[in-house]
Amino acid sequence: MRRLFQDEDFDFATRNVLGGVFAGAADVGEVLSTVDRIHDGRGRSWVDEWTATAERLLAEDGSRASVAARSLRAANYLATATGAADRTDDEGLFAAVWERHRQAWDAFVDTTHLAVERLEIPYEGTTLPGYLFRSGAADEPRRTLVYNNGSDGSVVGAWVRGISAALARGWNAMTFDGPGQNAALVRQGLPFRPDWEHVVTPVVDALLARSDVDPRRLALVGVSQAGYWVPRAAAFEHRVAAAVADPGVVDVSAAMLGHLPHHLVRLLDTGDREVFDKEMSLGLRLSPRVRAMMTWRMRPYGTTSPFDFFTAARAYTLTGDVVGRITCPVLVTDPDHEQFWPGQSRRLYEMLTSPRELVRFTAEEGADGHCEPLAVGLRGERVLDWLERRLTNPSGQYT
């Protein structure tokens, strides 16, 4: 498809925003008029224009339904704005715009006609925030979709790629902020961890304590880096009835290490932290865009050291022993032109010993690229059809 920006990050992010139109989280005219005002490759312009569009929506009066709809779109535009905050000279801009996006999302939660509940999930001496959308009565156990975001996905992304479509089919649907994600990162300072079963198990515990969640029909869907986290969690948390990895991720670090010169990889291998960080610092001075990307990527790992970042990322690897512990059915998506972890969906599929399926998404369908950004409808149909086949009642009926 024709590019909207020459800047690769801007172009990909715009495709993600446009995908939100299918779920009511964007409007085409708002997106295109915003894009038209942005100076290609300029981080401050990106942040300012998406923020301006969002603030216009948030300032407009209207009915409760209109306020909810506008708040949802504004939250999406503000989440998009955060992606270039590190490409400015304002160190506090990322957190400030993120907070504004969360305020807009919470305004949607407070005004929507949907049944939605804020959750505080007990987790290692603290809590993780979550949102549960219910499609039935409070005491009616139903199929429940748990949406696991990736490294930088927003709550609006969870709505677009999981929650909205599940609700339309009569599911409950929830999402949560795990360590290194959203509020758990920005407000609590919790970093990523590779042993994600210690995150998913408290989520499952909290859900299965409820009368409106069917314990036999709990689905776990992970996008982007959660294509690693979800299989990892499913290997140890066997109360998950079916899992989806979109895409499959076997080695998270491959997306980072592939951009390093060989001599820097050797420094990583030998553990020479001081020299590695010094050489990285010199190189990053020459490329503000790469420096901003590194700031963005290192933040959820809880470090400002490139050596510590790359070293930590190497721990996010699925081995055959771990994958072999998965017992539930697993769906792995495999889009054309996967730009971050090419080939890894097939690798994960081949490692699986539980019931499995690999589903292709092609450029001809308009469904290529990481997490199929412009094919929200088609992706949701295939994922939910597969889940419904796996979570059918013994009587053969969906409920």
Image: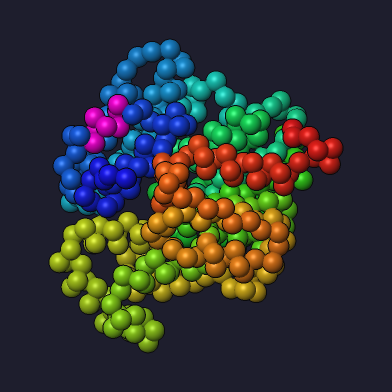
Color encoding of the figure: rainbow
Taking the image as shown, residue 139 lies to the left or right of residue 89, namely right
Q: Residue at x 16, y 42 (%)?
A: 39
Number of labels in the image equals 0
Where is residue 38 drawn, in percent x and y?
Answer: 19, 39
Q: Residue at x 45, y 32 (%)?
A: 22
Residue sitting farthest toward the front: 364
Where is residue 127 drawn, in percent x and y?
Answer: 56, 48
Secondary structure character of the magenta stretch overall? helix
Taking the image as shown, residue 208 lies to the left or right of residue 307, namely right
User: Where is the N terminus found, in terms of image quarters?
Assistant: top left
Q: Residue at x 18, y 34 (%)?
A: 37
Quarter where residue 341 is shown: bottom left
Question: Does residue 136 lie above or below 78 as drawn?
Answer: above
Question: Does residue 262 lie above or below 372 as drawn?
Answer: below
Residue sitting farthest toward the right: 395
Question: Does residue 187 lie above or below 262 as drawn?
Answer: above
The residue closer to the viewer here, 121 or 347, is: 347
Taking the image as shown, residue 42 lies to the left or right of residue 268, namely left
Residue 330 visible in the displayed image: yes
Taking the image as shown, residue 395 lies to the left or right of residue 253, namely right
User: Where is the C terminus found, in terms of image quarters?
Assistant: top right
The residue closer to the viewer here, 184 or 236, is: 236
Q: Is residue 240 magenta?
A: no
Residue 106 visible in the displayed image: no
The residue closer to the viewer here, 119 or 253, is: 253
Write the start and end of the magenta stretch as one range. Answer: 29-35
Q: Residue at x 34, y 80 (%)?
A: 265
Residue sitting farthest toward the top: 63
Where is residue 220 drawn, in percent x and y?
Answer: 62, 49
